[in-house]
Image: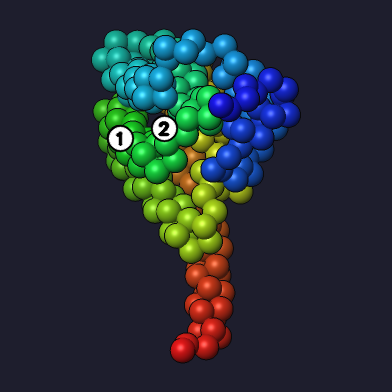
Amino acid sequence: MNRPIHSITEILDAIAQGRNRTNLLRKYEQRLIAFLVQYIPGWVSSNMLTALGFMGNVLVSLSFILAALCDRYWFLLGAAGFAISWFGDSLDGRIAYYRKKPRKWYGFVLDLAVDWLGIVLIGFGFVLYAAGYLKVVGYAFITFYGLQIIIALLKYKITGIYTIDAGILGPTEARIAVSLMMLIEIAFPGTLQYLAILADLVLILSCYLELKKTLRAADARDREEQSIPHN
């Protein structure tokens, strides 16, 4: 029978399995997750947390739509939605490792699929909120976020190491940044669309840098495999 995990060091080691984190806030984020997993009721499953995270993204998308139709103060709902999204998305897999009941491949597939659907919904909400040609900013965000996912999968295939971060930037930093952009939009209407352009440029640069790293890793693996004599 598996021994229960008690110490914070053991919890941190357990929840770190299956992922290599490099994001700026990883130290504080992992400690917060290590604290939270101890208090999630036993009847709450990983799938329930995944669903909760997805509902958070639905709220973010809905906040864009309501801000466009009613009042920009609905962006407060979007900031809350990102908090809910972080909670569900960050704890669904980690709670499984904490309970020593991981479903690595099932969780991997489900997490990616749900994340992608959530991003599509958020991008759709932005397109409805944005004016004129700036609608393309939402489309670009969906496109390059999708490319980021593809690059992460390719890197995993080549190196055997899976990471959800692009250098010091990860999903947590992205959620915080967009939440701040929403709050700024409440005080200064019209700024969100231009801040979103900046966010797209950062995402494009991140994709470019990660693609370069992945191509180097692919080239190194090709050279390694070609140097191995075939029987």
Label 1: how many residues lie within 10 Å, few (<14), some (14-19) or many (20+)? some
Q: Earlier in the sequence, mark 1 or mark 2?
A: 1
Q: Which of the pair 73/28 is nearer the observer? A: 28
Q: CA distance from mark 1 to mark 2?
A: 22 Å
Instruction: Name the residue rendered at 72%, 24% in the picture.
Output: 8
Q: Residue 117 got which mark?
A: 1
Instruction: Measuring from the top left, give residue 182's x and y in whole percent.
Output: 47, 22
Q: Is residue 128 left or right of residue 40?
A: left
- Evaluate if marks 1 and 2 touch, with contact meaning CB atoms under 8 Å apart: no
Location of the N terminus by quadrant is top right
Q: How is the image coloured?
A: rainbow
Instruction: Measuring from the top left, give residue 173's x and y in whole percent.
Output: 57, 33
Label 2: how many residues lie within 10 Å, few (<14), some (14-19) or many (20+)? many
Q: Which of the pair 76/19 is nearer the observer? A: 19
Could you tell me the amino acid type at mark 1? Leu
Q: Which of the pair 54/34 is nearer the observer? A: 34
Classify residue 193 by image quadrant.
Answer: top left
Instruction: Name the residue rendered at 46%, 26% in the picture.
Output: 92
Q: Is residue 206 visible?
A: no
Instruction: Measuring from the top left, give residue 150's x and y in whole percent.
Output: 39, 53
Q: Is residue 229 left or right of residue 149?
A: right
- The residue that mark 2 highlights is 193
Q: Secondary structure at mark 2?
A: helix
Q: Nearer the viewer, mark 1 or mark 2?
A: 1
Could you tell me the amino acid type at mark 2? Gln
Classify residue 27 by image quadrant.
Answer: top right
